[in-house]
Image (cartoon, rainbow, N blue to C red):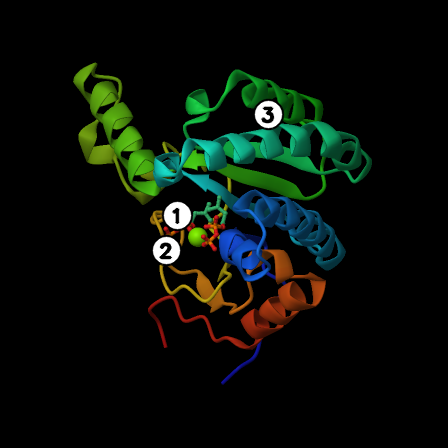
Amino acid sequence: MDISNETPRHIAIIMDGNGRWANARGLPRADGHRAGAESVREAVETCRQLGVDYLTLYAFSSENWNRPKKEINALMDLLERFLREKLPEMLKQNVRFHAIGKLDALPPKCRKQIDRAITSTAENTGLNLILALSYGSREEITDAARELASKAAAGEIDPASIDNEVFSQHLYTKDIPDPDLLIRTSGELRISNFLLWQISYSEIVISPKFWPDFKNADLRAAVEEYARRHRRFGTV
Ligand code: IPE
Ligand code: IPE
Ligand code: MG
């Protein structure tokens, strides 16, 4: 078996286990989310050190809106504060910020910080940090299908020209390469509506650790495991 993978160009992470991390300590779930924010900072730092070009973090799913209002509010407060406080660091570190998902569903105070982070980091050329917020992959795919159908109905696109490339360009992730490595923490063996189209050929690493315990060494270990994989893309 050849062991030839370079550093992944794009790492995507399903950051799971904040609630259980807090429960295990007798703390409210919101404390788990707060502790998880520190792991985000560390993941960004590690990706910068490793020379990763894109880091996509699943922070809030379309299904997470079904959680208790109190937890949703705590998450939105945390998101707003995280973006506000981390912007100077992102600027200093040459990080370019992006967000994917149904951002209109987020509270205005969060949208404001998202817009600000996107605008002020737009010229940065280092790590691309993409937060998936109010994100659902099925919605993303149906949005793309709807947009293409509208264009076809208006005569703007020939249905026969719709191929994988054209379809990809109608997803929220257009212009972002597919993830090479997908990591999920907390040991759960599922995708939970994350990047269904984009992970067709991603290598998957599952960590048993809860997200707040997933640190620099754990991310490096996942990248080392990726390097040992043999990606075949359907060939031999
Ligand atoms: C991940 O941790 C963060 C979000 C989904 C927002 P969870 O909140 O899902 O934590 P567990 O899975 O219940 O432990
Ligand atoms: C997936 O985690 C969503 C995020 C990490 C933001 P969940 O905790 O919501 O997923 P399930 O419910 O375990 O599938
Ligand atoms: Mg969870």
Residue found farthest to the bottom: 1
- State the image coordinates of residue 93 (x, y, percent, origin top left): 79, 40
The reply to whether discs 2 and 1 touch (Cβ–Cβ < 8 Å) is yes
Q: Residue furthest right?
A: 92
Disc 3: which residue: 114
Q: Quadrant of residue 231?
A: bottom left
In the rendered structure, the answer to whether residue 121 lies left or right of residue 59 reads: right
Amino acid identity at mark 2: Ile
Residue 89 in the image, given as x and y percentages of width and height: 79, 36
Secondary structure beneath disc 3? helix
Residue plotted at (52% across, 68% down): 207
Calculate the distance from the C-alpha at mark 1 to the C-alpha at mark 3.
Answer: 20 Å
Image location of residue 116, percent across then percent down: 65, 20
Mark before the other along the chain sequence, 1 or 3? 3
Q: Mark 1 CB in 8 Å range of ligand 2?
A: yes
At x 56%, y 43%, the residue is 30
Judging by the rendered image, the residue that carries numbered circle 1 is 194
Q: Is residue 71 left or right of residue 213?
A: left
Residue located at (60% from left, 18% from top) = 112
